[in-house]
């Protein structure tokens, strides 16, 4: 119940595809995991634009709809805890957070209840739950997959992407989102390993996964990452308030306490703060633009630590890592589980230039083969 908001058991042999309940599907209401939205939700008149490929595949018997899945309320949170609709259970460890906001998408795949799930990613909402639940997730280039019919959080950052148990599943998911998608012909030779302060077990797992391949590893250092992370958070939060301020005014009692508190804090962000944040982000984008002349992809941990226990969910903000800065740069990123010395897997994040999803997934396939050999 906590994973699926609407469950389906359509017959057939194609992959079972779950859809985050932020994405409109004709004939079904979209709740955004929020009582405030659900109170007035009506069945959607049409599918979101990103579902065209899936709908065609369902019609021809090449895919099955598994259901609409839960999320962190309003897609505004990274723990995945949802007290109104229930918190999806992390199949790796039920005592730990599933990650958000695409929590139901991640748990459906990790529990074997879906083969592919669509999530959205505005500041890490595909990659973070993928890391928490030990699956793979792809944040797409901003604007590559249409977001019409997807409830916005921050329109200049929002993206739609697939989640699956492995990279092959992500390739299949991308082919549904973008018919004709393939990784054929894409090669990766050089990976930049970004220096970032993470749990040593996580850092070692990321490094060991790369060392298992024949990729050339080039150390990369970028200064002021803390300032970049803060700036990206400012831009996201300011946009989230603009998107949801009318909902807060109309139905504050129906919004969960933690999300409501965070939105009210975001309402205090000034235009001057956003302008200053955008200046920092411009420097970050320029740094990345220069980096692609040196490396094919950039590697680092998706999360700086392992998913915390449910009662320590706020610790997610301490380990969220470099996810939101990818969104403000508009770039694609892959989250891939890699073995660690602990009981839980770590997650490797690969970042590439705009439009390089094919390259990222080709690199992911290469790494998967190496670590499974």
Image: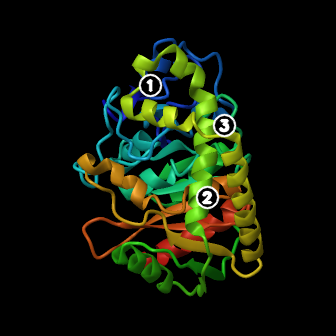
Measuring from the top left, give residue 236's x and y in whole percent. Answer: 60, 44
Lower sequence index among marks 2 and 3: 3
Q: Residue at x 42, y 66 (%)?
A: 304
Q: Are marks 2 and 3 in contact (CB under 8 Å)?
A: no
- Number of the label disc, if any, that sits on residue 34: 1
Q: Residue at x 48, y 63 (%)?
A: 302
| Residue 69 in view (yes/no) | no
* Element under disc 2: helix
Q: On the picture, is 239 further left or further right than 255?
A: right
Q: Residue at x 58, y 68 (%)?
A: 225
Measuring from the top left, give residue 248's x and y in whole percent. Answer: 52, 22
Q: Residue at x 56, y 87 (%)?
A: 214
Indicate the quadrant containing the N terminus: top left, top right, bottom left or bottom right.
top left
- Number of the label disc, if any, that sits on residue 325: 2
* Element under disc 3: helix
Q: Residues within 10 Å of mark 2 (few under 14, many from 20)?
A: many
* Element under disc 1: loop
Foreground: 67 or 310?
310
Please say if 296 is above or below 264: below
């Amino acid at each position: 119940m906590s994973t699926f908001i609407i469950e389906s058991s359509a017959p057939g042999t194609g992959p079972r595809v779950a859809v985050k309940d932020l994405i409109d599907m004709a004939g079904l209401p979209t709740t955004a995991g929020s009582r405030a939205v659900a109170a007035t939700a009506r069945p959607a008149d049409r599918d979101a634009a990103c579902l065209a490929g899936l709908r065609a595949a369902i019609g021809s018997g090449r895919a099955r709809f598994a259901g609409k899945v839960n999320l962190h309320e309003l897609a505004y949170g990274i723990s995945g805890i949802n007290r109104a609709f229930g918190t999806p259970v992390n199949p790796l460890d039920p005592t730990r957070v599933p990650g958000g906001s695409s929590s139901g998408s991640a748990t459906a795949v990790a529990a074997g209840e879906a083969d592919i799930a669509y999530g959205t990613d505005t500041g890490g909402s595909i990659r973070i739950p993928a890391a928490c639940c030990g699956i793979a997730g792809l944040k797409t280039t901003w604007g590559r997959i249409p977001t019409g019919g997807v409830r916005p959080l921050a329109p200049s950052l929002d993206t739609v992407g697939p989640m699956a148990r492995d990279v092959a599943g992500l390739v299949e998911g991308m082919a549904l989102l973008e018919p004709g998608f393939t990784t054929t012909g894409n090669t990766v030779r050089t990976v930049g390993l970004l220096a970032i302060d993470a749990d040593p077990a996580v850092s070692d797992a990321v490094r060991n996964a790369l060392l298992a391949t024949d990729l050339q590893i080039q150390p990369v250092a970028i200064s002021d990452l803390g300032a970049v992370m803060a700036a990206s958070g400012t831009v996201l939060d300011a946009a989230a308030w603009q998107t949801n301020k009318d909902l807060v005014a109309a139905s504050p009692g129906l919004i969960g306490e933690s999300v409501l508190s965070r939105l009210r804090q975001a309402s205090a962000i000034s235009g001057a703060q956003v302008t200053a944040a955008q200046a920092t982000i411009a420097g970050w984008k320029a740094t990345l633009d220069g980096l692609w002349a040196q490396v094919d992809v950039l590697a680092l941990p998706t999360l700086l630590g392992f998913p915390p226990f449910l009662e320590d969910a706020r610790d997610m903000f301490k380990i969220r890592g470099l996810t939101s800065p990818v969104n403000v740069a508009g770039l694609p990123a892959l989250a891939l589980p890699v073995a660690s010395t602990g009981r839980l897997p770590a997650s490797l994040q690969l970042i590439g230039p705009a439009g390089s999803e094919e390259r990222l997934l080709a690199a992911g396939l290469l790494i998967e083969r190496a670590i499974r050999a």
